[in-house]
Image (spheres, rainbow, N blue to C red):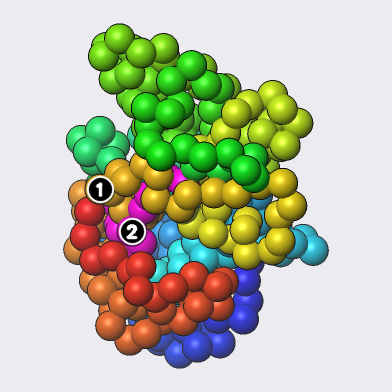
Amino acid sequence: MNRRRLPALLGTAALALALTSCGSAEAADETGLPGLIENGKLTVCNSDSNYAPMYSMENGEFVGVEPSLAEAVAGELGLEVSFTRMAFAGVIPAIQSDRCDMAMGAFFLTPERLEAMKGLPYLAANVALIFPEGESFAGPQDLAGKTVAVQRGSVQASTIEAVSADLEANGSEPITVQNYDDPVTAINAVMNGKADAAGETEVFASSFFSEERTGLDYEPTFFPTGSVTGFLYKNADLEPALTSAMDKLRTDGTLAGILEEFNLSPESISDGA
């Protein structure tokens, strides 16, 4: 976990935890979170891949925007946070089967996902196109007949699959979508000539290109999604508390501080899906 932000949260957390130490049933009632999977803890299912700056393992510590933000949300609620790492493709099924209170994985809060679950938005979202330096893609039509690498099970994948279907419906060649288990491997497919381009979130691409990347270029908003990034959860009983906690983190500057800590712009903060 990213422990740098914990001291600022301990005052609120300690007070709330002191009030909820009478017993597990009472604790759930007094925190206002009767729907918790485990009393006293906010259990969070998350991807075991590295997706800096959103989440990654560094020197044995789980760090990034989302771990820090999950800790901050839990702190506002007077709870501990408990992370359970798993394959990216298994995170949404885990929240749907009530294995955790909240799911994180830099998820786009798409209408399809929000039909089955609830979302806690915090950041605007777009899909970037990453391609070899010197190449030029003016729009989706230029991807007809091309191979695009994506992370398996991601919104990047479904977004580009939808673009491919539209191209084919209009008489153009479809896009060949290559699926990989993590974004770095997908980008390496471009570097190795196995794919013509890669689709990745604007957030990840901006971080990836914050270092000099010889041989690659990108267009950060190639696929506008009209969506936002956020946490997912299922239990409606948690909605008032989670929404209130996130609103507090927006207004008191905590969310902006977390984004700045990981080189993202506070101007991208979103207050709705």
> Which residue type does callout 1 highlight?
Gly
> Main structural element of the magenta stretch: helix, strand or loop?
strand
- Mark 1 crowdedness (10 Å alpha carbons): few <14, some 14-19, many ≥20: few
Quadrant in which the C terminus is drawn: bottom left
- Mark 2 crowdedness (10 Å alpha carbons): few <14, some 14-19, many ≥20: many
Q: Give the total number of marks visible in the rendering.
A: 2
Residue drawn where x is 56% and y is 43% of the image? 130
Is residue 42 shown to the viewer in this render? Answer: yes
Q: Disc 2 on helix, strand or loop?
A: strand
Quadrant in which the N terminus is drawn: bottom right
User: Percent from the top left, x then y, of residue 164?
Assistant: 38, 20
Q: Disc 1 on helix, strand or loop?
A: strand
User: Percent from the top left, x then y, of residue 252?
Assistant: 33, 86
User: Percent from the top left, x then y, of residue 115?
Assistant: 20, 35
The label on residue 124 is: 2
Is 5 rendered above or below residue 143? below
The label on residue 205 is: none
> Which residue type does callout 2 highlight?
Ala
For the magenta stretch, what is the residue range? 119-128
Residue drawn where x is 52% and y is 21% of the image? 146
Asked if residue 18 is among those painted magenta in the image, a careful observer would answer: no
**Which of the two residues, 26 or 69, is positioned nearer the viewer here?**
69
Asked if residue 127 is among those painted magenta in the image, a careful observer would answer: yes
Residue furthest to the right in view is 59
User: Percent from the top left, x then y, of residue 266?
Assistant: 39, 75
- Determine the CA span between mark 1 and mark 2: 8 Å
The label on residue 226 is: 1
